[in-house]
Image (tube, grey):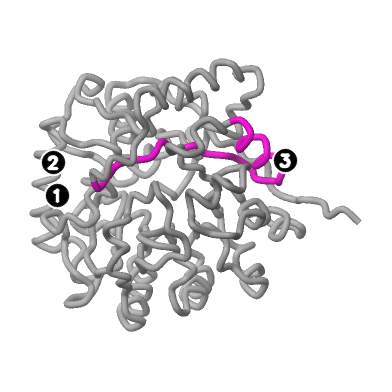
């Protein structure tokens, strides 16, 4: 008997729409920013991973195999619940589901009615996790290739078939869960884009996001110009096969194989400060205990607002050190030195809103 996949109808354009910042921005203007909690928090609670991907943007950080202590995670979970955080990503530094008792902490957050997302390669997930995972808002599964040899070269793993299995396992019951796929375009799989896209959709994934390898650590893992051109040619040839509701390939083409915009000052009427940071949109908790405000700067302690091994999240957030880092980040933003950051798109939408451009059907999404 063939199982029926049941899920809500999702549209990737809403997930990627930077205008989702606007309801949060409007609401924040009525409050003192110095007492606002973060809207969304991304937990990198461990550096351990069951994969060793060639394109990993955290490869240097993972070499120490660090992770937060159980005590630190338990206290920070309580703090985030108490502060009224709206959404939490369980993400990497490593593979979040390799962290001891990860499911117990995730269940506590679910029970507190915090919206939850998991970014995972899915291999460590077990059947006893499925009931809890069906209560998440979305799960993004890393996929790599439809060619087993490419998969092994990229990941160093032998779990080729499992990368496409999770949608059928989770969505064979009624659930509001969205299960998406994320594929990093790297020097191994860059010629295989449409096969990966087709296989993922046929396997029941609600969407497929393609992410050109991001070289955060300057390890030269990003695509060459020749490889980028090959990807662009594939997209151009397959335009009639692309559904913008379930993949970002058209965005990739428009941005010329760049996931985030790198230039932004010419798109803003005022770039004196980052509105996304001012309104406390995001926090990133790293596995060494440091707390950051910008994903690309995770690991750069110059921009850490505090460390959970020596202080609580509740005390770190909106502290004098937090305000000092905001000032430093605002200077960086004003000088046009930010890159590979989702907040760039948010700032552009806020700027358009402040300049009275009309917006309709603004998506309501706590995952910023």
Residue 304 drawn at (x, y percent):
16, 59
Q: Is residue 312 left or right of residue 17?
A: left
Neighbourhood count class around disc 3 (C-alpha, 10 Å): few under 14, some 14–19, many 20 upward = few
Residue 214 drawn at (x, y percent):
34, 40
Residue 343 drawn at (x, y percent):
30, 39
- Measuring 82% from the left and 51% from the top, which residue is drawn there? 4
Upstream in sequence: badge 2 or badge 3: 3
Neighbourhood count class around disc 2 (C-alpha, 10 Å): few under 14, some 14–19, many 20 upward = many
Q: Is residue 92 left or right of residue 135?
A: left
What residue is shown with label 2?
Answer: 330
- CA separation, marks 3 and 1? 44 Å
Image quarter of the N terminus? bottom right
- CA separation, marks 2 and 1? 6 Å
Q: Nearer the viewer, residue 292 or 39?
A: 292
3 or 1: mark nearer the eye: 3
2 or 3: mark nearer the eye: 3
Tag shown at residue 326:
1
The answer to whether residue 199 is visible is yes
Magenta-drawn stretch contains 11: no
What residue is shown with label 3?
Answer: 202
Q: Magenta segment range?
A: 194-217
Q: Quadrant of residue 286?
A: bottom left
Q: Nearer the viewer, residue 185 or 130?
A: 185
Q: Quadrant of residue 173?
A: bottom right
Vertical arrangement, residue 361 with respect to residue 86, above or below: above
């Amino acid at each position: 008997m063939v199982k029926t996949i049941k899920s809500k109808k999702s549209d990737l354009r809403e997930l990627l729409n930077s205008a989702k910042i606007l309801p949060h921005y409007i609401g924040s203007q009525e409050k003192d920013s110095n007492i606002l909690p973060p809207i969304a928090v991304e937990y990198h609670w461990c550096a351990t991973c069951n994969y060793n991907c060639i394109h990993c943007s955290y490869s240097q950080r993972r070499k120490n195999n660090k992770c937060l202590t159980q005590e630190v995670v338990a206290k920070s979970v309580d703090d985030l619940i108490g502060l009224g955080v709206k959404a939490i990503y369980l993400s990497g530094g490593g593979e979040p589901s390799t962290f001891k008792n990860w499911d117990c902490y995730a269940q506590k957050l679910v029970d507190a009615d915090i919206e939850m997302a998991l970014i995972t390669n899915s291999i460590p997930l077990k059947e006893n996790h499925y009931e809890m995972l069906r209560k998440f808002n979305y799960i993004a599964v890393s996929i790599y290739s439809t060619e087993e040899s490419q998969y092994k070269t990229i990941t160093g793993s032998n779990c080729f078939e499992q990368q496409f299995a999770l949608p059928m396992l989770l969505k064979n019951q009624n659930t509001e869960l969205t299960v998406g796929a994320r594929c990093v375009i790297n020097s191994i799989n860059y010629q295989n884009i449409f096969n990966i896209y087709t296989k993922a959709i046929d396997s029941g994934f609600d969407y497929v996001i393609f992410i050109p390898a991001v070289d955060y650590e300057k390890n030269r893992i990003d695509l060459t110009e020749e490889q980028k051109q090959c990807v662009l040619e594939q997209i151009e040839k397959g335009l009639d096969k692309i559904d913008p509701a379930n993949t970002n390939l058209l965005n990739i083409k428009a941005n010329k194989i760049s996931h985030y915009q790198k230039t932004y000052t010419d798109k803003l009427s005022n770039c004196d400060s980052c509105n996304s940071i001012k309104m406390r949109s995001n926090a990133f908790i790293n596995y060494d205990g440091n707390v950051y405000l910008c994903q690309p700067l995770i690991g750069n302690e110059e921009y850490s607002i505090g460390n959970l091994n020596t202080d609580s999240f509740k005390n770190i957030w909106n502290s004098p050190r937090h305000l000092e880092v905001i000032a430093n980040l605002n200077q960086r933003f004003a000088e046009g030195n930010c890159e590979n950051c989702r907040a760039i798109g948010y700032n552009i939408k806020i700027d358009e809103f402040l300049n009275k451009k009309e917006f309709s059907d603004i998506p309501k999404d706590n995952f910023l």
